[in-house]
């Protein structure tokens, strides 16, 4: 609420004539007759009058108990006068950030009784100069959260340009300094409001510094196998081996078996294994894979295949609006068709006996949670739990898409074919998915050096150019100056 609305509508702060919720808010209270009303021969015993009680004291309205309307008018006049005087001196719409910083600096200089505190006050004065230059003219009433964001961006850009022009200066992190300056403004405003006893307040927004995200890394084949094994069996994260237990068979022999997951956890991890294999084979983003359904649907991503699993993977419905993310359809290759045919029979989309598509109108999701329901949000948390349970780190669900691209590179597939099968473009592959892993890079180099044609061409090379320093050139020993003088 602005200062003008508070002046014009005092009842907006609290109900007049009733005890207010704030200790500083004035209110009406009944009390006995004051001394001034008792006169000789005219004592008014038993009469009560309305008093205005406020933070600084109290005074009488000179209105009797039955004249409550007159008392409320006096209270409203007092409250309007009080708020006008208070906000007229320090109104938010007229108070600038520069004035608040100057007042805070003067207060700290007054309390600086040691040389160390005086130095700190001088340092803060230099900081105030930077703040005033970027946002000093802004009033407290006009401040918005976007001003803090713009301040950080402007300060970071200014410092980065300075470091480019003065390369001899040791660069520092400008983001840390910008956030510290905003915290300085926040403390100054809070101190100003508290010291002046103001009824308004203003919170200065300080953006949180997010941790830099690690680049999505690919998963090696052994790490991927470990995730898939972890979806079926329990793995000891310290040793990386499958947990075992001893069971007694019907013939009385003791056997050692792996411990499988049970219950809801078993179902949830099974569908996570589906998600992993589907992303690896198709390169589909995980948020699209979670909404993948069986059948040709108009409003959602779907798998349109026949009884043998062949068909198309539609990453968006034909009536769904397109976005900036490329989500084209791609054909189903042979290895993916085998997986989809097995999953479709398990989900009831393909009849197990006849092998025909079941058209019953049900919406069957490819990926479901532990309660056999579709995911309503992202799958980051359950995937991180799986990664930690098998003793791995720094593998995210989005890194599966990078892994899919790297597997295509290692298999020798062209970029055009990879872009078509993974539902992206060659430009995107060259820009974001060129993080070759070490194994693939070594394999590519060995294949190039072990190529028979290139080896034969290397053997036919003839070096006819002279060496930079022919080793048959006569060596001339240098003569010392002393020997020359002696001769």
Image (cartoon, rainbow, N blue to C red):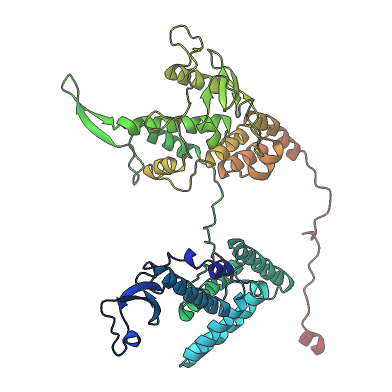
Q: Where's residue 47, x and y in %?
A: 29, 76
Q: Where's residue 416, x and y in %?
A: 70, 31
Q: Tell me if 369 is positioned left or right of 468 in this view.
A: left
Q: Tell me if 123 is positioned left or right of 160 in this view.
A: left
- Farthest residue to the right: give it: 465
Image height check: is 207 above or below 454? below
- Farthest residue to the front: give it: 41
Q: Tell me if 429 is positioned left or right of 67 in this view.
A: right
Figure quadrant of the C terminus: bottom right
Question: Which residue does the image show at 50% across and 16% down from the upper left?
Answer: 361
What is the quadrant of residue 450 in the picture? top right
Question: Which residue does the image show at 32% across and 42% down from the upper left?
Answer: 236
Question: Which residue does the image show at 55% across and 33% down from the upper left?
Answer: 288
Figure quadrant of the N terminus: bottom right
**Residue 445 or residue 352, whichever sits in front:** 352
Image height check: is 312 above or below 406? above
Q: Where's residue 303, x and y in %?
A: 56, 22
What is the quadrant of residue 38 in the picture? bottom left
- Farthest residue to the top: give it: 354
- Farthest residue to the left: give it: 252
Total number of numbered labels? 0
Q: Taking the image as drawn, is residue 193 in sight?
A: no
Image height check: is 321 above or below 108? above
Q: Taking the image as drawn, is residue 250 in sight?
A: yes
Q: Where's residue 145, x and y in %?
A: 58, 62
Image height check: is 226 above or below 104? above
**Residue 56 or residue 125, whichever sits in front:** 56
**Residue 152 or residue 327, whichever sits in front:** 152
**Residue 310 or residue 259, whichever sits in front:** 310
Question: Which residue does the image show at 51% across and 74% down from the upper left?
Answer: 80
């Amino acid at each position: 609420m602005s200062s003008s609305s508070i002046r014009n509508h005092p009842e907006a702060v609290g109900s007049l004539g009733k005890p207010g919720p704030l200790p500083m808010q004035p209110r009406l209270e009944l009390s006995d007759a004051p001394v001034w009303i008792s006169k000789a021969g005219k004592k008014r015993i038993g009469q009560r009058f309305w008093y205005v009680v406020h933070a600084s004291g109290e005074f009488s309205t000179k209105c009797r108990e039955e004249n409550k309307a007159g008392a409320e008018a006096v209270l409203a006049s007092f409250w309007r006068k009080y708020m006008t005087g208070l906000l007229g001196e320090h109104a938010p719409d007229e108070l600038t950030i520069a004035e608040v910083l100057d007042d805070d600096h003067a207060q700290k200089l007054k309390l600086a009784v040691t040389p160390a505190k005086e130095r700190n006050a001088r340092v803060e004065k230099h900081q105030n100069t930077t703040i005033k230059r970027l946002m000093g003219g802004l009033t407290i009433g006009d401040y918005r959260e976007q001003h803090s964001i713009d301040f950080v961006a402007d300060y970071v850009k200014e410092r980065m340009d300075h470091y480019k022009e003065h390369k001899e200066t040791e660069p520092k992190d400008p983001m840390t300094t910008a956030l510290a300056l905003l915290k300085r403004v926040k403390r100054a405003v809070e101190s100003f409001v508290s010291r002046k006893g103001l009824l308004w307040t203003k919170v200065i927004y300080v953006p949180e510094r997010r941790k830099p995200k690690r680049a999505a890394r690919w998963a090696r084949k052994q790490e991927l196998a470990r995730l898939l094994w972890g979806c079926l069996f329990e793995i000891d994260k310290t040793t990386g081996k499958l947990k075992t237990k001893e069971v007694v068979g019907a013939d009385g022999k003791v056997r050692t078996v792996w411990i499988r997951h049970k219950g809801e956890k078993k179902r949830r991890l099974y569908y996570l294994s589906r998600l992993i294999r589907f992303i690896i084979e198709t390169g589909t983003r995980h948020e699209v894979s979670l909404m993948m359904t069986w059948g040709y649907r108009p409003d959602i991503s779907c798998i349109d295949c026949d009884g043998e699993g062949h068909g198309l993977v539609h990453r968006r419905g034909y009536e769904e609006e397109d976005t900036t993310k490329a989500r084209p359809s791609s054909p189903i290759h042979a290895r993916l068709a085998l997986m989809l045919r097995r999953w479709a029979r398990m989900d009831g989309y393909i009849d197990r006996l006849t092998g025909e598509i079941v058209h019953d109108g049900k919406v069957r999701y490819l990926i479901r949670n532990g309660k056999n329901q579709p995911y309503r949000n992202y799958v980051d948390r359950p995937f991180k739990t799986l990664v930690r349970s098998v003793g791995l780190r720094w593998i995210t669900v989005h890194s599966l898409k990078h892994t899919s691209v790297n597997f295509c590179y290692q298999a020798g597939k062209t970029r055009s074919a990879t872009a078509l099968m993974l539902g992206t473009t060659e430009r995107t592959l060259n820009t974001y998915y060129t993080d070759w892993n070490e194994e693939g890079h070594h394999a590519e180099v060995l294949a190039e050096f072990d190529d028979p044609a290139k080896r034969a061409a290397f053997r036919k090379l003839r070096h006819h150019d002279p060496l930079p320093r022919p080793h048959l050139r006569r060596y001339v020993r240098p003569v010392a100056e002393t020997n020359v003088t002696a001769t």
